[in-house]
Image (cartoon, grey):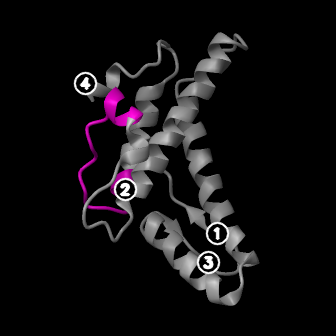
């Protein structure tokens, strides 16, 4: 957590600690890998991040989580500094959870438009990425239910 403290993006009131803890919690649901030490250098190199022997797509999931959390922090920072509105303590965390929920639902719903031969492999890839049953409840006929608590 100490290395995460300096990632405030020059904004003390954006409640990012809760958002990082939420990202860590989301990370733990689909994987047994240890949550990495988040540093500015890791964030800068996120696009090149990869793990060896990665059948559960942990590398891709971590890249997505880092990008989403930085976006959520940025949105909160802009609300405070540009719009001059207060940010409630859990707002950045809730923004992060909403972004991830939307990404998963949109990815799943997009598979409906794929040809039959491409739909099932893509659905399997999404299930692998987001841990079917442990983090997301995938139902073929409706949008997935995300447990982002």
Question: Looking at the image, can residue 131 be seen?
Answer: no
Which label sits in the foreground, 2 or 1? 2
Q: Which residue is mark 2?
A: 59
Q: Which residue is mark 3?
A: 139
How many other residues sit within 10 Å of disc 2, few (<14), some (14-19) or many (≥20)? some
Instruction: Kindly give the residue lying farthest to the right in the view shown.
Output: 113
The residue tagged with tag 2: helix, strand or loop? helix
Q: Which residue is mark 1?
A: 108
Q: Label 4 to label 1, Cα distance in Å? A: 36 Å
Seen in the picture, residue 60 relative to 144 is either above or below; the reply is: above
Q: Label 2 to label 1, Cα distance in Å? A: 20 Å
Magenta stretch, residue numbers: 27-44
Question: Which image quadrant: the N terminus?
Answer: top left
Q: Earlier in the sequence, mark 3 or mark 4?
A: 4
Q: Residue at x 64, y 11 (%)?
A: 81
Q: Position of residue 3 (x, y in %)?
A: 27, 26
Q: Label 3 to label 1, Cα distance in Å? A: 10 Å
Q: Which residue is mark 4?
A: 2
Q: Earlier in the sequence, mark 3 or mark 1?
A: 1
Q: Label 3 to label 4, Cα distance in Å? A: 39 Å
Q: Residue at x 61, y 46 (%)?
A: 99
């Amino acid at each position: 957590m100490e290395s995460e403290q300096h990632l405030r993006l020059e904004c003390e009131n954006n409640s990012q600690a809760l958002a990082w803890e939420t990202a860590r919690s989301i990370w733990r649901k689909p994987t047994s890998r240890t949550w990495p030490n988040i540093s500015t250098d890791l964030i800068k190199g996120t696009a090149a991040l990869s793990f060896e022997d990665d059948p559960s797509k942990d590398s891709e999931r971590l890249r997505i989580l880092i990008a989403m959390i930085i976006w959520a922090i940025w949105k909160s920072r802009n609300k405070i500094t540009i719009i001059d509105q207060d940010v409630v303590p859990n707002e950045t965390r809730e923004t992060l959870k909403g972004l991830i929920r939307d990404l998963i639902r949109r990815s799943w719903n997009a598979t409906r438009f794929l040809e039959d031969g491409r739909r099932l492999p893509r659905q399997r890839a999404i299930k692998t990425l987001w841990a079917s049953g442990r983090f997301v409840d995938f139902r073929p006929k409706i949008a997935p239910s995300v447990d982002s608590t």
